[in-house]
Amino acid sequence: MAALYALGALTQQQAQSFRLHVDEGCPVCQAELLKFERAVAGMGLAAHEAQAPDYILDLVMARADADNLRILLDVEKEGGARLDEILSLAGRPAARVVRLSGQGGALSGWGAVVWDAQENRLVAFGNFPQPPTGKVYQLWFLAPGGRIPAGFLKTDPTGRIFASMNLTGDTSGATGAAVTLEPDNGSQIPTMPFLAVGRAE
């Protein structure tokens, strides 16, 4: 059951029951769960990736020359403020970046996540198809101890995403991030498959 839990293949009730069992201190299940969660955290990263536009990594890794980036992106006033926020966060010493690459399928998208675990701050942006009615995109951090819910990613009418939020979980050990499609009130464990995934840099 540890493998199914790590893959997100259990129902909510089954997952909660198994999580309670693990939290009660079963050493065998704890060891199995840790092993499978580490494997799952790397599964999406080994898959064939649909690459995001080339400027994405340059954008989030930039530390200076914001004027040239504005020209490159041809941003409007609102976009300029968002770019300033991205660059400000990306310029912090503890900042980390994930470039999200689509995994194929009708709802596959691309994007990037910049976060600072010390400041508990995150900015995510990209482009995804409009989700079905009653569904929402949810962002997760991938860590050896499990998947950490980070918040919702809402699309505008053109499919663009920009989210700026405070983090509530400990993401200092995150090795990557992923996006899933969830019910509009969100989930505590991700519904597979990942629609986009990336490794932390």
Image: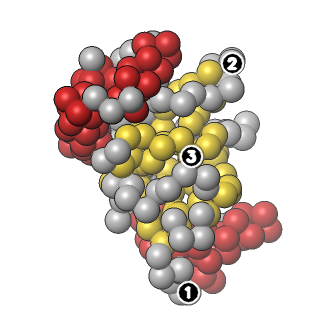
Q: CA distance from mark 1 to mark 2?
A: 41 Å
The residue indicated by pointer 3 is: 150
148 versus 98 height, above or below: above
Taking depth in this image into account, of 119 and 72 the one nearest to the observer is: 119
Q: CA distance from mark 2 to mark 3?
A: 19 Å
Residue 199 at x, y percent in the picture: 33, 54
Residue 66 at x, y percent in the picture: 60, 82
Of the image marks 2 and 3, the number of the one nearer the N terminus: 2
Residue 155's tag is none
Label 3 crowd (10 A; few <14 / some 14-19 / many >=20): many
130 versus 67 height, above or below: above
Residue 53 at x, y percent in the picture: 43, 55
Type of amino acid at the residue the image marks with label 1: Asp
Q: CA distance from mark 3 to mark 1?
A: 30 Å
Label 2 crowd (10 A; few <14 / some 14-19 / many >=20): few
Type of amino acid at the residue the image marks with label 2: Gly
Q: Residue at x 56, y 86 (%)?
A: 65
Residue 134's tag is 2
Label 1 crowd (10 A; few <14 / some 14-19 / many >=20): few
Of the image marks 1 and 2, the number of the one nearer the N terminus: 1
Taking depth in this image into account, of 185 and 31 the one nearest to the observer is: 31
Q: Quadrant of the C terminus?
A: bottom left
The residue indicated by pointer 1 is: 65
Q: Residue at x 61, y 55 (%)?
A: 167
Q: Residue at x 42, y 40 (%)?
A: 147
| Residue 67 located left or right of residue 18 | right
